[in-house]
Each structure stands twice: as C-alpha cells, then as structure tokens.
Image (spheres, grey):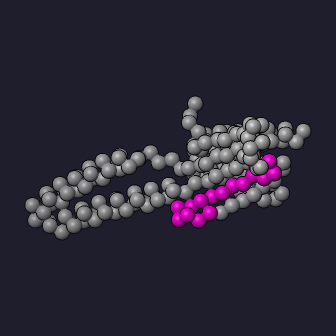
Amino acid sequence: MRPAAYSRIVTTTPDDHARNQTPVLFDAILTPHRSLGAPGFAVLMTVVAAVNIGLGVSFMLQGAWPIFGFCGLDVLLFYVMFRLNYRSARLFERIRLLPDELIVERHDARGRTESWSFQPYWLRIAIDDPPEHHSQLVLSSHGRSLAIGGFLSPGERVDLAQALRQALQSRRGMDA
C-alpha cells in the first residue's frame, strides 16, 4: 500500500461536535512530492561544482581558459533551476468538508490563495477508472467543476477520491 499524498485527514467524533460550533468532517492538505531533500541537494551541488571545477581547471591548463567561466555558469544555472523547483513545491491545496459545505483552497508558491465552495449533498467526484497519468480528479456541483490534486500521482488521486467519497457518504448519512 502506498502512502497517502495528503499529510493528514481529520475526522470528528460526537465529542468534537459538542466542543466546536462547526465540526470539520474531512480535512486534507495536498502537497507536491519532492524526492530530493535539503541534505541531498547540498551533496548534489557539491558534486556538480567539484566536477565542473575539475573540468574547468583541466581546460584552463590546456589553454582553453574561457571554458572555465562556462563551467561556473553551468553550476549557477543548475542551482537556480533547483531553487525554482523547490519554490514551486511551496504550493498546496486544502480540502475541508464541513456539514454545510466543502471548501477547496489552493495556495500558490507566491502565497496567493484561491478558494472554492461546494454544497456537499450534490457534489460529484469523478476520476478515470483505471486512472492514467493525465487523469484528473474533478469535483462538480450545480454546473461548476474544479480539478484538484493535479500534482499527485494517479494512484494518489484515486486514494484521495475514495477518502473524500467516504467522508461525503458519512456526511450524507448524518442527514438521514
């Protein structure tokens, strides 16, 4: 079984209803996966810099001294591209199911937030079965649709769809 891409799911108990005016029935924070952490990035940059400095020095000793500058530029571009990649990892989506609405918040890398609200009773969750790489997890209600979790793998999107469907069924059971 693969780990869930969302960092947490919070469900409530009857005791929570007594303590809180608006109980949260489902709460998921979706974050993009980055396989290279900070220590790995430091090691990678050290190796890339060492190789480029070695190549640059060897070219300089052979009389091709301008190539040494290009080796430094190569390392700088490599560093900048990774920093931009890590910056994009700051985006996340939060999905919260309350008794009267489902709220989706999308936070981008610059800190801007977009928010959508759906009435949970009429909410439909759609994803291809079996999922493919380009399959989208789509929430739709009353003629409005929203694709969520675009940065998740297909299996993670299916897991999220199942967890969200289960939470919606539990919520709908509260009305009966």
Instruction: Identify which residue is drawn at 72% across, 59% down.
Output: 116
Residue positioned 51% across, 47% down in the render: 33
What residue is shown at x 66% (from left), y 57% (from top)? Answer: 105
Q: Is residue 155 above or below residue 67?
A: above
Q: Is residue 75 visible?
A: yes
* Residue 28 on the magenta segment: no
Quarter occupied by residue 56: bottom left
Which residue shows up at 22% across the image and 53% down it?
50
- Report the span colored magenta: 98-113
Q: Is residue 71 above or below residue 4?
A: below
Residue 89, position as x, y percentages in the image: 50, 55
**What x and y, as percent, mark residue 115?**
69, 61
Residue at the top extreme, as displayed: 1
Q: Is residue 170 left or right of residue 112?
A: right
The answer to whether residue 166 is visible is no
Q: Quadrant of residue 78 in the image?
A: bottom left
Residue toward you, 130 or 84: 84
Asked whether 112 falls inside the magenta stretch, the response is yes
- The quarter of the picture where the C terminus appears is top right
Task: Please identify the quarter of the rendering in which residue 65 is found.
Answer: bottom left
In the figure, is residue 168 to the left or right of 82?
A: right
Up/down of 84 relative to 176, above or below: below
> 23 or 33, which lies in front?
23
> In the picture provided, is 14 more to the left or to the right than 110?
right
Quarter in which the N terminus is drawn? top right
Q: Residue furthest bottom?
A: 66
- In the rendered structure, the answer to whether residue 49 lies left or right of residue 97 reads left
On the image, the x and y values in percent for residue 175 come to 88, 42
